[in-house]
Amino acid sequence: MDTYKYKRVLLKLSGEALMGDAAFGISNDVLAYVADEIRELRALGTEIAIVIGAGNIFRGVAGSSAGMDRAMADNMGMLATVMNALALSDTLERIDVKTAVLSAIPMETVCEPYSHRRSLEHLKKGNIVIFAAGTGNPYFTTDTAAVLRGLEINADIICKATRVDGVYDKDPLIYDDAVKFDSLGYAEVLRRRLKVMDAAAISLAMDNNKTILVLDVNIPGNIKKAICGAKIGTLISGVENE
């Protein structure tokens, strides 16, 4: 029987990961796949919290670049994360996985308002906690929200599930000669300006020595293997890459 290496996991899912082959929106097939992966992870006995992005619906930075007020655009982006969180929650609940959606922007008729104590209570009950609405503040990405929530719940690791199998020196979807890193130090990520997470998220992780693992969510069983200790993706920590 598989055993976990990390007891409490903060999983960061990008909104784009929910699109499937579409240009935007939510793919029910992808939702079902992601829910199954989370159920398998939960079966190990781990405690799981999730922060989800909204790039599949609306991205605040994109709205700002098109002329919108940045704070207003970011507020729209945070609301879009609530839509993704509710969709994932519904999919999980339909396969008998209990969830709790906690929003940094209060909307009690839709989901629970975020509180630190409430999130810990749900985790101890075995519920999957889905953090929505980012940090509740404009100018902060969901990557930063993921690190912040990971610190608040004292997660053993922050797992960023993306559409690539780790961190590269340049975009592997564009450049055939892109080189993958097995491990990186926080300072090296910042120094190289690698776009795995924004600088605020990496700096927050560095200041608090919180390990980040970047892996491909599209490979079945990848997350479970990583949480069990397999060498998958790219590990970002306080140890510099040699």
Image: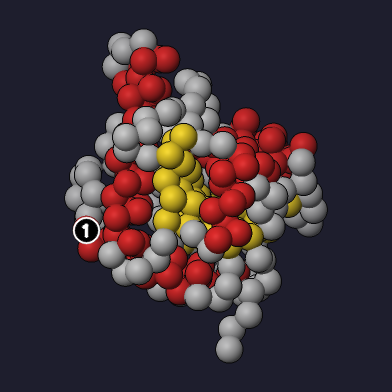
Whether residue 197 is visible here, answered yes or no, is no
**Image point (56%, 46%), residue name:** 119
**Element carrying mark 1:** helix
User: Which residue: 80% across, 53% down?
Assistant: 239
- Name which quarter of the figure residue 163 lies in: bottom left
- Residue that label 1 marks: 28
Horizontally, residue 173 falls left or right of residue 195, namely left
Quarter of the image where one finds residue 48:
bottom right
Residue 97 appears at what percent x and percent y? 39, 66
Camera-side residue: 91 or 171? Answer: 91
Pointer 1: residues within 10 angstroms few (<14), some, or many (20+)? some
- Position of 162 compared to 56: left or right? right
Which residue occupies 50% across, 75% down? 43
Q: Nearer the viewer, residue 149 or 179?
A: 149
Q: Is residue 28 above or below residue 83?
A: below
Vertical placement of 122 versus 151: above or below?
below
Looking at this rendering, what residue extends furthest in the bottom direction?
1
Q: Is residue 224 left or right of residue 66?
A: right
